[in-house]
Image (cartoon, rainbow, N blue to C red):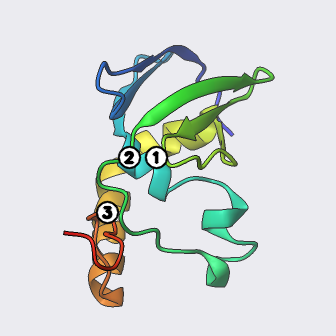
């Protein structure tokens, strides 16, 4: 647990990224896609490391809204209706600090599993 406290959370105009600034001077731009695929929800993380899900098809996901949760977290609601992840300040700080490694790991998992960042097209769609 850290003592860093967010001083600003700003969603970009296109709703595709979140900038979070902490009182220790650290600031991170996190894409909506990374936030969505790394959601701390049980739906994504499972109840153990073996249950964690690699979430494909979220290249175009956007942040629909954010809701404060007490004084320790924010619920990010995405435009694909995913809304069960509570992003604690510590989690967001860790995600910012390890953004590149987390992103590279996600891309590696997609490749290993034959999945794509591209949104799914329904069968028969042009």
Q: Is residue 98 visible?
A: no
Residue contact at pointers 3 and 2, CB within 8 angstroms? no
Frontmost residue, 121 versus 1 = 121
Q: Which mark is residue 55?
A: none
- Left or right of 71, for residue 38: left
Q: Which residue is found at the position 31% from the left and 69% from the top?
A: 121
At mark 1, the secondary structure is helix
Q: What is the distance, in whole Å, between disc 3 and disc 2 at their CAs? A: 9 Å
| Residue at 36 percent of width and 88 percent of height | 113
Nearest to the observer: residue 32 or residue 122: 122
Q: Which is more foreground, mark 2 or mark 1?
A: 2
Q: Residue furthest left?
A: 126
Number of residues whose C-alpha sits closer than 10 Å to that of mark 2, classed few (under 14), some (14–19) or many (20 or more): many
Which labelled disc corresponds to residue 61? 2
Q: Earlier in the sequence, mark 2 or mark 1?
A: 1
Q: Is residue 58 left or right of residue 45?
A: left
Q: Residue at x 26, y 64 (%)?
A: 118
Residue 12 to residue 120: above or below:
above
Bin the neighbour count of mark 3 within 10 Å (Cα to Cα): few under 14, some 14-19, many 20 and up: few
In the rendered structure, which disc, 3 or 2, sits on the residue that comes first in sequence? Answer: 2
**Quarter of the image that includes the N terminus:** top right
Q: Nearer the viewer, mark 3 or mark 1?
A: 3
Q: CA distance from mark 2 to mark 1?
A: 10 Å
**Residue that numbered label 1 is attached to:** 35
Q: Who's the residue at 60% across and 20% down the image? A: 5
Task: Identify the residue position indicated by label 3 in the image.
Answer: 119
Dot placed on the residue nearer the N-terminal end, 3 or 1: 1
122, above or below 26, in the image: below
Give coordinates of residue 66: x percent, y percent.
59, 26
Judge left or right: residue 65 versus residue 34. Answer: right
Element marked by disc 3: loop
Q: Position of residue 119 (x, y in %)?
A: 31, 63
């Amino acid at each position: 647990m850290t003592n860093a406290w967010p001083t600003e959370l700003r969603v970009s105009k296109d709703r595709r990224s979140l900038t979070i600034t902490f009182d220790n001077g650290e600031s991170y731009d996190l894409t909506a896609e990374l936030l969505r695929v790394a959601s701390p929800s049980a739906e994504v993380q499972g109840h153990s490391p073996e249950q964690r899900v690699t979430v494909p098809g979220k290249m175009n996901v956007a942040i629909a809204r954010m809701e404060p949760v007490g004084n320790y977290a924010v619920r990010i609601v995405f435009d694909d209706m995913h809304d069960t992840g509570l992003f604690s300040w510590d989690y967001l700080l860790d995600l910012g600090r390890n953004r590149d490694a987390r992103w590279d790991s996600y891309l590696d998992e997609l490749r290993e599993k034959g999945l794509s960042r591209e949104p799914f097209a329904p069968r028969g769609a042009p």
